[in-house]
Amino acid sequence: MKKNKDNSETEEFDDDELLTTPVEEDSQEEEAVSVEELKTENEKLKADNEKLHEDFLRAYADAENTKRRCAQEIEKNSKYAISAFAKDLLSVADNLHRALEAVDGGDAVQIKQFKEGVKLTESELMKVFKKFGIVKIESIGKVFDPAFHRVVQEIDDKEKPSGTVIAELQTGYMINDRLLREAMVIVSK
C-alpha cells in the first residue's frame, strides 16, 4: 500500500496483474465472439449479395428476351397486318376477272350481264371495306373541305354557292377516323 499526499492509502498493482484480471478476460472473450459473429454475418451477407446478383442477371436476361420477342412480334404483325383484308379482296378480284371474261365478244345481253356483274362486285367490295372500317367520303353537294377534298378544277355555276363540290372525279375514303385518300373534286366558283 502506498500513502498519498493527503495520507489516504491506495493499493498498488503490478502491470501484469492488470492484464490478467477477470474483467479483461471476459472482454477479450466477448471481442473474440464478436469477431466470429461478424465474420459469420459477413459471409452470410456475401452469399445474399451473390444470390441477389444472380437473380438480377436472370431478371435482366428475361427482360431482354421479352423485349426481343416483342420486337419480333411487332415486326410480324406490321408485316402481315393486312392479311385478312387482302384475303377478303381476293374474291373481289376473282369476280372482276369473271366479269371481264364474260364481256369478250359481247352482245347486248353479255354487256348487260357485265354491268350487273360489275355492280355486284362493287357491292361486295363496299362490304369488305365496311368490314375493315373503310367508308366513302360523300362529297357532291357539300362545301369544299381541304382536309377531305383536293380541287382539280373550278367551274362557274350560278345555281350553287361558291366552294360547293359539284362533281367528283375520284372518290375519297376514310379508314375509321382517319383520311385514307382525299377526294378529287370539281368546285363551283
Image (tube, rainbow, N blue to C red):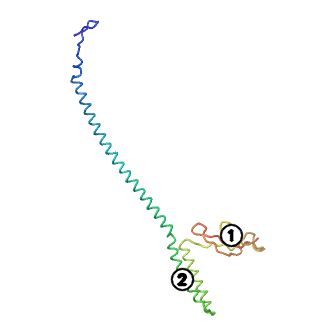
Q: Quadrant of the C terminus?
A: bottom right
In-front residue for pair 101/150:
101
Q: Secondary structure at mark 1?
A: strand
Q: Position of residue 88 (x, y in %)?
A: 51, 77
Specify the label residue 29 is tagged with: none
Picture quarter with the N terminus:
top left
Q: Using residue 138 as the reference point, say whether residue 7 is left or right of it.
A: left
Residue kind at label 1, given as amino acid type: Arg
Q: Residue at x 57, y 68 (%)?
A: 176
Q: Nearer the viewer, residue 143 or 65?
A: 65
Residue 61 percent location from the top left of the image: 40, 55
- Residue at horizontal 29 percent and vertical 38 percent from the top: 39
Where in the figure is residue 43, as x and y percent of width and height? Answer: 30, 41
Circle 2 sits in a helix, a strand or a loop, which is it? helix
**Circle 2 Cα neighbour tier, 10 Å, few/some/many (<14 / 14–19 / ≥20):** few
- The residue shown at (52%, 79%) is 90
Question: Pointer 1: residues within 10 angstroms few (<14), some, or many (20+)?
Answer: some
Residue nearest the observer in this picture, 147 or 43: 43
Is 101 placed left or right of 71 in the picture?
right
Task: Report the front residue among 88 and 141.
Answer: 88
Which quadrant of the figure has residue 10?
Answer: top left
Q: Is residue 107 above or below residue 123?
A: below
Q: How many marks?
A: 2
Residue occupied by mark 1 = 150
Residue under the point 60% across and 87% down: 114
Q: Is residue 14 above or below residue 149?
A: above
State the CA–CA distance, disc 2 to disc 1.
32 Å
Amino acid at dot 2: Asp
Numbered label attached to residue 94: 2
